Image (cartoon, grey):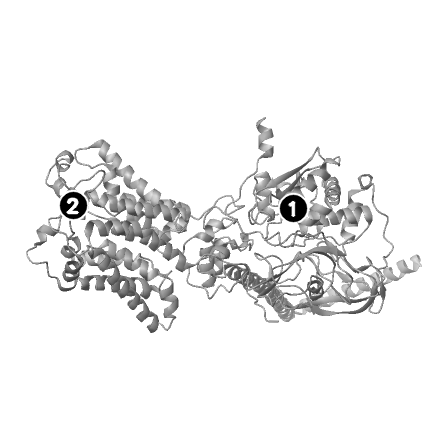
Amino acid sequence: MLSLLNRRRLWRFHGGLHLPDEKALSNGHPVVSMPLPRQLVIPLQQHIGRRARPIVEVGERLLTGQLLARAEGDISACVHASTSGTLIAIEEHPVPHPSGLSALCAIIAPDGEDAWATPPEPLTHYAQCDPATVRERIRWAGIVGLGGASFPTSVKLNPGPDQPIQTLILNGVECEPYITCDDRLMRERAGDILAGARIMHYLLGDPRVLIGIEDNKPEAIAAMRAALAETDMAGYTEIRVVPTQYPSGGEKQLIRILTGREVPSHAIPARIGIVCQNVGSAAAVADAVLRSRPLVSRIVTVTGRAIADPRNVEVRMGTPIADVIDFCGGLRETPRKLLCGGPMMGFALQDTQAPIIKPSNCILALTEEESPDPGSALACIRCGRCAEVCPAKLLPQQIYWHARAKDLDRVQDYNLFDCIECGCCAQVCPSHIPLVQYYRYAKNEIWAREEEKRKAELARARHEAKQARIERQERERQARLRQKKDTLAAATSDASGPAAKQAAIEAATRRASAKRAAALDQTETSKGVS
Amino acid sequence: MSVSLQCSPHGLRPNRVDRVMQEVLIALVPGVLAMVWFFGWGVLINIALAVSVALMAEAAIMLLRRRSVRTALGDYSAVVTAVLFAISVPPTLPWWLTLLGILFAIVLVKQLYGGIGYNPFNPAMAGYVFLLVSYPVAMTTWLAPNMLAEHTLGFIESWRLIFTNTLPPGVTWDALSAATPLDEMRGQLDRGLTIAEIGQSPLWGLFGGRGWEWVSAGFLIGGLWLLWRRIITWQIPVSMLAALALMAGLFWTLDPQTHPLPTFHLFSGAAMLGAFFIATDPVSACTTKRGQILFGAAIGVIVFVIRTWGGYPEAVAFAVLLMNIAAPTIDHYTQPRAFGHTRGRVNR
């Protein structure tokens, strides 16, 4: 009985915020597919890890779902053509990234036919396949975490024999305000999400499956429950409704809520037997394994009060963001902020020609009223509100203090690297200090310093090796010289008497005759062989 | 397109320093009203004077530092300091002492350390203690609460007393003033009287000094309001009051003839004002939760120790300043265990 109670229990994480969720703005309409744009810009890196290596030639005609670039190394993801057309270039193009920098992209001129490449055989009976084959299919499909982190899914589904997985968590929390793409996905494709979960369940060796959904999405919860009732998964699957609180959709926070366990600092959840996947990734896994469909499109929430017609749109990867905004009626007014992602963790877009990529869950155009200028930052009054809301249980103001002083050792003492940059601290700060910016700055400084240190270490090692070599060579030279000198000295001192001279001559004759005999021997042996 | 490229979070941020300070000022209203009721117009005149001087001093320093005067005055922190100072000093304090105390608080203790957020000491309490040790007589001459006084001062009379140091004709200091309850208690105990004998004095009310108990109750109400508004957290006030009450209760149980009831300690002096409005000043207090409990409890203990065995009848200001010194160290050793860590500590 107690264990039953325990099983149903939810845990709390420290801090967090109750924010106006703003979901109603965009979750009322079903997802619509956007027509093909005039041009697709497909970055070769849309994931965490190494950039994929292009395997197509400029000028080549491509088919929908054709592999454009192959995953390189262990942590990487394949990239596919999202529609048929001509590859017109592989070149630098602005991509959605906080830095605003450009990256290598495949530029495709769609032909409008959307002709699919011949897919590999679907693995409908995947349970009879080797798990490695199924994982390879997921890797082929280019699936990454669609919740925003974009870590390659196939890697997460291969935790290795030393990390047995007891729990698979499907993340349908979607705690950031405004974003509703997972909400719509759960309402409309609950069956596919569960099918994907079933495949992951197989690959991870029979763990229990927990699906976490925030209680502000009653329709999604109902749809998922109905779909679960139609599967054979009820024995190991549970849908758990979690209270609406930001950032309960953070991986470590959701694990804490659902299992009461804390992922150790600097470790991945697999360390404690847990794998966490976004519901969108689960649906993509079902598409890849059961229908051999690679990840060529995703649902994007286009919202904010500056958007004329906020909604969720199914968009091909590589569609310019400007086209997506136009499809949603364009901008009602000039937004004060145009973001990729939600209001808490999203970043400002610097170029609307940047494309939609795998982790782009939301395009958010905020008006002046929704995102007023916070004004210039005031001094920290140490009120401690930031520490009260910090889900990582840090002391944000102390980290800020030391980051400002550029005391990089101190910020690490205060566990800077446990910061998940959720923005809760800055959200409640009465002095409107851009705290997250300071943390990112400090992290980058530390990474840069580590890199410097590593390089310096390498240079030092090389220098030392060179020094050692030079010294060794010098020593050897000295030794040879000394030996020569000694022999010479010995010869001169010995040469004083005629007897010694005679002995030296005899020794030389003996050596010469021995050499001759050896040479003769050598010739005969070689003759014998040939 | 000219959109803002600021860092996340991007939404509306409702909290602001000036609102925090305004809430503190609002929370002071019940206590201040009770003070005005029992001790007359001098309280309000002191507040007005202290606030004006504080704003002028802050503005002058901001001009010298070439910083925005508007921003500094707009955060209301100088006003809070001035009001806390003004309600801590006697309602008839000569104007130049208020001026001196506020200048000390704002210029030396606050601005010379870098202004709001950087002062290691509570400015109001530092200003108060500076005057207390420099001008002990003026700082301990308190008016009697109105029901005990032979003469209560009107507005003009208070004004004249503060600015020209002239008493109303025919009125002596004896007719106006009385020992504060804490003074009375210390004095009589030192004279060897028992609590029962001291209790005969008309100075005592229901649970504290007469008049004073209602002033304390007013600050308690304001403090609870601050808690409810989440401007302050429970750790410092609760631990301070609990430590004071526990110490008082312990000694009262051991020897009720020489130690007053815990309620006396809580409701006769500045305990309530100190617990909710002074010790909770975030800039100079501890910032970790465990640290705040230690900080508050230590203040409670020090208050009791000084009141009972020290050289002063009241000790909230000393206790707060002493613990201000210790706050950074306490913070250092009470870092919380971060998420995913096995134990919380600073590694060096």
Q: Which residue is mark 2?
A: B147
The answer to whether residue A22 is seen in the rendering is yes
Residue A295 horizontal/vertical position (percent): 76, 54
Q: Nearer the viewer, residue B281 or A138?
A: B281
Q: Is residue B76 left or right of residue A510?
A: left
The answer to whether residue A381 is seen in the rendering is no
Residue at the top extreme, as displayed: A1
Q: Which residue is mark 1?
A: A172
Picture quadrant of residue A163 = top right
The numbered mark at residue A32 is none
* Label 2 SS: loop
Q: Nearer the viewer, residue B143 or B183?
A: B143
Q: Is residue B128 left or right of residue A278?
A: left
Residue B98 horizontal/vertical position (percent): 21, 61
Residue at the left extreme, as displayed: B170
User: Which residue does the image show at 85% across and 62% down from the upper left?
Assistant: A113
Q: Please state the chain letter of the residue tagged with numbered disc 1 in the rendered image.
A: A
Disc 1 residue type? Answer: Gly
Picture quadrant of residue A330 = bottom right
Count neighbours of disc 2 (C-alpha within 10 A) and say few if under 14, some if 14 to 19, many if 20 or more: few
Q: Please state the chain letter of the residue tagged with numbered disc 2 in the rendered image.
A: B
User: Which residue does the image show at 39% across and 49% down from the upper left?
Assistant: B232
Residue A270 horizontal/vertical position (percent): 64, 44
User: Which residue does the image show at 69% across and 34% down from the upper left?
Assistant: A236
Disc 2 residue type? Answer: Met
Quadrant of the image containing the C terminus of chain A: bottom right
